[in-house]
Image: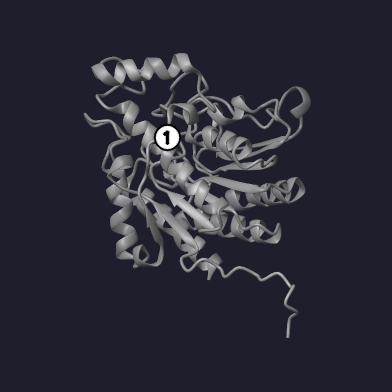
Amino acid sequence: MASSDTPETPDPPRHPVLLVAGEQIAAYGFGGGHPFGPDRHESFMRELHRCGLDGRVRRASPRAATRAELEYFHTPEFLDLVQERSASGHGYLDAGDTPAFRGVYEAASHVVGATLTAAEAVMAGEARRAFVPIAGLHHAGRGHASGFCVFNDCGVAIEYLRRVHGLRRVAYVDIDAHHGDGVFYAFEDDPDLLFADVHQDGRSLFPGTGSAEETGTGPARGTKLNIPLLPGAGDEAFHEAWLRVEAYLRAGEPEFILLQCGADSLAGDPLAQLHLSENAHAHAAARLCAIADELGHGRVLGLGGGGYDRRNLARAWTRVVGAFLEAGA
């Protein structure tokens, strides 16, 4: 029998996976036939229900990020611009990919708030893993929107984990077909931000960045991992690249892992030319959970990211949630 002064091991959360979803983030989408339409959220939720996984997760509703939280990553001038164009509903928030619409500031703020809600639950031990479908807006920079991304919830979350929870080494892993340039360049001189990105070669795809030679700058030179895949690459090429990601993460020993699991890397996406299956996403999610458990904290947060074929994104994201559930069983 254990002595009375032996610390008790806390019971694991009853629902080890938290899903932060709802109409507040479903509203983040562009109309008029834009690839990033507001129907993406419902496509995922229908598939999650069809697979019987919606009853196995704990649900939370998104909240809006505060102005102070948005300023963890974004400049005040940029936030003012988005507020102004959100009120008018006119113009673009970048060079032409990301149109303004009435309420875009509020919708984008809820995406960031949803990611922070998920991160907070994981840090509090209320869930071992969490998933947010409409999130992972990895192209936005500190002072600009880009590529359908208004606010960069990934970047805000990294800064939040450091400022609020005192973490130092956070890992950002990205398997979206498009390079996560907004995160990479915001932290390219930061040796403590682990960055691993498997994506389609930027010579053939927006944003044109993420070559293997981009490994960080200044004190972070040699600390980032970019792995471009040629158009047409499938699961075999992904798995070869993934072995490098695992070795990189084990060496870096992060205290928290963010997974941007964009489904535009699946075969048939209208905006990219990789040929992965949803098995790649399930494998990445499961292996990150295993690594996080090996490191002793278990913290993994999945963010939906891109994906413009509705069937693809629904299946890939559902497989990620399923992998999280199996890892927490």
In front here: 266 or 138? 138
The reply to whether residue 152 is visible in this rendering is yes
Which residue is depicted at the point 40% across and 67% down?
56
Q: Residues within 10 Å of mark 1 (few under 14, many from 20)?
A: many
Outermost residue, front side = 4
Which colour style is shown?
Answer: one colour
Q: Amino acid at mark 1?
A: Ala
SS for tag 1?
loop
Outermost residue, left side = 32
Left or right: where 89 falls relative to 252: left
Q: Quadrant of residue 95?
A: top left
In front here: 311 or 101? 101
> Would you place residue 32 above or below residue 293 in this image?
above
Q: Quadrant of residue 151?
A: top left
Left or right: where 194 falls relative to 281: right
Q: How many marks?
A: 1
Instruction: List x then y, in percent, for residue 90.
Output: 25, 16
Which residue is depicted at the point 60% across and 29% down?
184
Residue identifier under label 1: 65
The N terminus appears in which quarter of the rendering?
Answer: bottom right
Which residue is depicted at the point 29% across and 50% down?
43
Outermost residue, bottom side = 1
> Would you place residue 128 above or below residue 178 in this image?
below
Left or right: where 278 falls relative to 181: left
Instruction: List x then y, in percent, for residue 112.
Output: 43, 36
Instruction: List x then y, in percent, for residue 167.
Output: 67, 42
Instruction: List x then y, in percent, for residue 313.
Output: 38, 48
